[in-house]
Amino acid sequence: MEITVYGPLRTAADGKVLTVATGSSTDGTDKNAANSNTISEGSESIDTSSVSASSPETVSELITMIAETYPQTKSHLFDCEGTLRPSVRILVNGNKASPETQLDQSADIQLFPAMRGGSGHTVTRYD
């Protein structure tokens, strides 16, 4: 299961693409170990990280898993009461999803946190 994160989540999660690796492989190695690496595609490098844990069944479980694995993402995903921010957009296989959406191992997930900030300066327009 691949999770593509955008905006400030990229920095907080140490990469653009997170991969949820679960279960044991046929060679006996444990796929649940968290690791980070870089995959090169042509001239572009893509950072990837594996999230360790059992396979999440819902979007809510997946987001909780990411927040536990990458604590820096919590403030981007959850408010101070621990509720998923309403501004977080989640796509599963290209379709808008809710926290209750069921996941399968082939799911392609995209997380878009709210983009915040700005310069705080007044912008002068010249028409």
Image: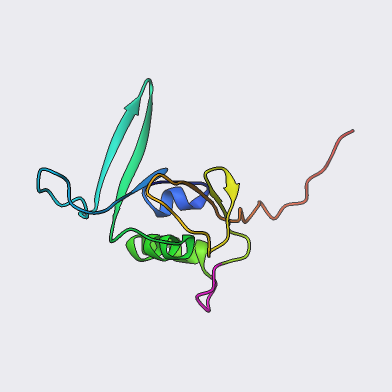
- Classify 25 as above or below 120: above
Q: From the viewer's perspective, tell me whether residue 29 is left or right of residue 120.
A: left
Per the picture, the main secondary structure of the magenta-coloured stretch is loop
Q: Which residues are magenta?
A: 79-84
Whole-percent x and y of residue 36? Answer: 26, 45
- 93 vs 115, nearest the viewer: 93
- Classify 106 as above or below 113: above
Location of the C terminus by quadrant is: top right
Residue most extreme to the top: 42
Q: From the viewer's perspective, tell me whether residue 89 is left or right of residue 59.
A: right
Q: From the viewer's perspective, tell me whether residue 115 is left or right of residue 93.
A: right
Whole-percent x and y of residue 108? Answer: 46, 44
Labels in figure, total: 0
Q: Residue at x 69, y 55 (%)?
A: 120
Residue most extreme to the bottom: 81
Q: Residue at x 47, y 65 (%)?
A: 60
Residue most extreme to the left: 28
Quadrant location of residue 106? top left
Quadrant location of residue 52? bottom left
